[in-house]
Amino acid sequence: MTLFAPKSLKAALAVSLIALATAPALAATPDNALVIAQNIDDIVTIDPATAYEFSSGEYVTNAYDKLVAYDAADPDTLVGQLAESWTVDVAAKTITFKLRPGVIFHSGKPLRGADVVGSFKRVLVLNKAPAFILGNLGWKVDNLESMVTTEGDSVTVNWAGDFAPSFVLNVLAAGVGAIVDIETAMANEKDGDLGHAWLNQNSAGTGPFKLVNFRPGEAMVLEANKTYFNGAPAIERVMIRHVAEAATQRLLLESGDVDMAKNMSPDQVAGLEGKAGIKVETYPQTAVHWFSFNQKTEALTNPALWEAARYLVDYKGMADSFLKGQMQVHQAFWPAGFPGALEDTPYSYDVEKAKKILADGGVKTPLKIELDVINSAPFTDIAASLQQTFAPAGINFDILPGTGAQVITKYRARTHQGMLLYWGPDFMDPHSNAKAFAYNADNADDKYASTTTWRNAWMPPEAVNKKTLAALAEQDADKRNAMYVELQREMQAESPYVIMFQAVKQVAMADKVQGFVNGPSAAFVFYRLVDKK
């Protein structure tokens, strides 16, 4: 088995890719392929060491494996993936994993303990957006090889910090825990990039699918890994067409050009009701949607502005109209339905109350704020609603639309004023979001952190930082959850972001599509079990 498809197959797939991206309506999609219409312009990178967007997270899940993971067959349970088994020594703060025998990479090379160590170190050396996830374990470039060691068919990980082994396992199950074929990656290194550029066009994993073609903002083609250790995928190929417009996605699905439409707006979903051969599946999500104020802009630093903003959002109006069926009102950083979630929604639209808060707090109006937003539904619709409901209080949003990649890149550079975005946990533990919304170790420009606090240049009170770390260290599950609820109450009352909704995913697909698994986040989207009956 080789990393690249044979030339004849590559040529055929390239032709298919071009046809999918440009051709008019087709009679039907291929029986052996799942063809998807999806907005994938949020992708900045697909290298698993640096991928940190929703669409790239889906790709990593399907092309790479981790030591432990939530699997398509049972997405609610953490299981061994590349690890056949493991033993925990709490006193020594170690977990020793026995690697699954016979696993091979897309290149045909066998999985080795050195690939595990090398993959983790590569994340830390590149030090891009998701690197902080592994940093939670006390891992650094200069100590990684002592913290993660390998001998024979086993890998032992050590952690520095007071937290439960379950937290460690959830960290390793994050996308950044993907194991890469280090020899192949390094064979394609250029200018010290550790193979980064090459991995943005090729896969080097052990996953159920391997990358055949990726054209940013256009399309992606994945091919089944026939030798996948957990069984070859039922479908031979997954073809993703970049289609930003919900109406176009619907037309492509109705015409038979695609098997699945993944970014349908509520009105387009409603228009499919009663359509023969099409079904709509609903999947609760962990993503929370919010907008924020960058504290680098002096006019946005008054806490009275933050508080008033909470009363200038028409939460119910949006949830009952253009967001119907795809968003539920939620006003805390950890999603409802999971232990440790605060489900109170104390804020509602009240212009007069907001005006009084602004006046009493000394906020000068009219105030103009640039609001960056992804140029697709539902983001542009939410932005338009905010623009309308904030205006009566003298706060005027100047909406700046851009592609997902453009908006996210600007956010990471801290050059925005207002930002309308979403956040999903990097791993299924409340600390994942608590660290993002209630912790900032260092607010300096050169101390990049993948958190909403740092990206909005906000330094929480030191007491809040301490409470976040204390919740992480708490061993009693009930006490720990209560601590996270209290953190959410504090952030709900005073922070430079307003959390509005929790997402609900609606995916429209042909009736013949069976076995698609879409868990609560992008990292839980699986194509391995898909079949077209």
Image (cartoon, rainbow, N blue to C red):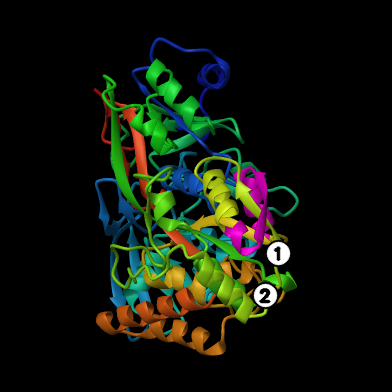
- Amino acid type assigned to the residue bearing label 1 in the image: Leu
Which residue position holds label 1?
A: 367
Please identify the quarter of the rendering in which residue 22 is found: top right
Residue 435 in view, yes or no: yes
Drawn side of residue 429 relative to residue 465, left or right: left
Q: Mark 1 Cα within 10 Å, few/some/many (few <14, many 20+)? A: some
- Amino acid type assigned to the residue bearing label 2 in the image: Val
Highlighted range, magenta: 390-412
Vertical position of residue 321 compared to residue 350: above or below: above
- Residue 357 placement (x, y as % from top left): 57, 76
Drawn side of residue 195 relative to residue 167, left or right: right
Vertical position of residue 120 compared to residue 407: above or below: below
Query: Which element carries disc 1, helix, strand or loop?
Result: strand
Q: Nearer the viewer, residue 456 or 358?
A: 358
Q: Which mark is residue 514?
A: none
- Residue 181 placement (x, y as % from top left): 51, 49
Residue at the (40%, 16%) spot, across then down = 255
Vertical position of residue 486 compared to residue 406: above or below: below
Which residue position holds label 2?
A: 363
- Residue 175 placement (x, y as % from top left): 46, 55
Q: Nearer the viewer, residue 78 or 53?
A: 53
